[in-house]
Image (spheres, rainbow, N blue to C red):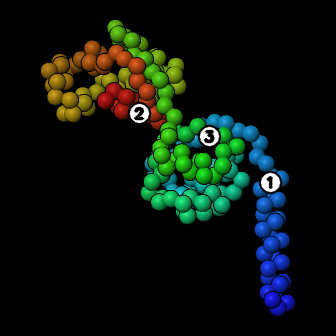
Amino acid sequence: MNKPQKLLLSFFLISLAALILYFLINKLEYKEDLFVIKEGETLRIISENLKEEGYIKSGNFFYLSLCLNNNPKNIKAGTYALNSEMGNLEIISQIIKGSSVSEKITIIEGWTISEMADYLEKKGLFKKEEFIETANSNDFITEFKFLGYKPENMNLEGFLFPDTYYISLDNTPEEIIK
């Protein structure tokens, strides 16, 4: 091995050691929270958001890991429970599988639309008025033929089945009603 090759190898090994030390010494402050990936977000935006919110150390390294290991089209929008001790591959696995967080809601028999709206607002899903407005609309008649028999001035009260449901935290009132 000649002198320039030895120099290049030494530089590479020192750089690699420095990079490893950086990742070992530079620990993230522990954080556990929900992380949202919106429909249409790019890999670059997702990587930078993860870094800015304190889940990963390097947005570029995460981006590279994501591109090398997976088809970017496999990433699913949703709300994910993450913590800063998860590795890049663990986070990637969650967002590829679509392991989105869900909320358990229980609609009680006999509840009015207003009571349902109060309950869903207390759960932090959306504003009461938003749910009531959606339930009062006639937007569902074409999709659900049986609703064609309800009087036009009547809301969906009596048509929403009481049960326990697991819904995504980013569901809209319309998606919950369906």
Q: Nearer the viewer, mark 3 or mark 2?
A: 3
Amino acid type, callout 1: Leu
Answer with the quarter of the image where residue 63 lies: bottom right
* Label of residue 119 in the image: none
Q: Is residue 33 visible?
A: yes
Give the CA distance from mark 3 to mark 1.
20 Å
Q: Quadrant of the C terminus?
A: top left
Q: Secondary structure at mark 1?
A: helix
Which of labels 3 and 1 is toward the front? 1
Query: Which type of secondary structure does the marked residue at label 2 adopt?
Result: loop
Q: Which residue is mark 1?
A: 24
**Residue 177 position in % (x across, y down):** 33, 27
Q: Residue at x 58, y 37 (%)?
A: 81
User: Which label's residue is closer to the chain start, 3 or 1?
Assistant: 1
Name the residue type under label 2. Thr
* Mark 1 neighbour class, 10 Å CA radius: few under 14, some 14 to 19, many 20 or more: few
Label 2 sits on residue: 172
Kindly state the secondary structure of the residue where label 3 is placed.
Answer: strand
Does label 1 or label 2 sit earlier along the sequence? 1
Q: Position of residue 60 (x, y in %)?
A: 65, 61
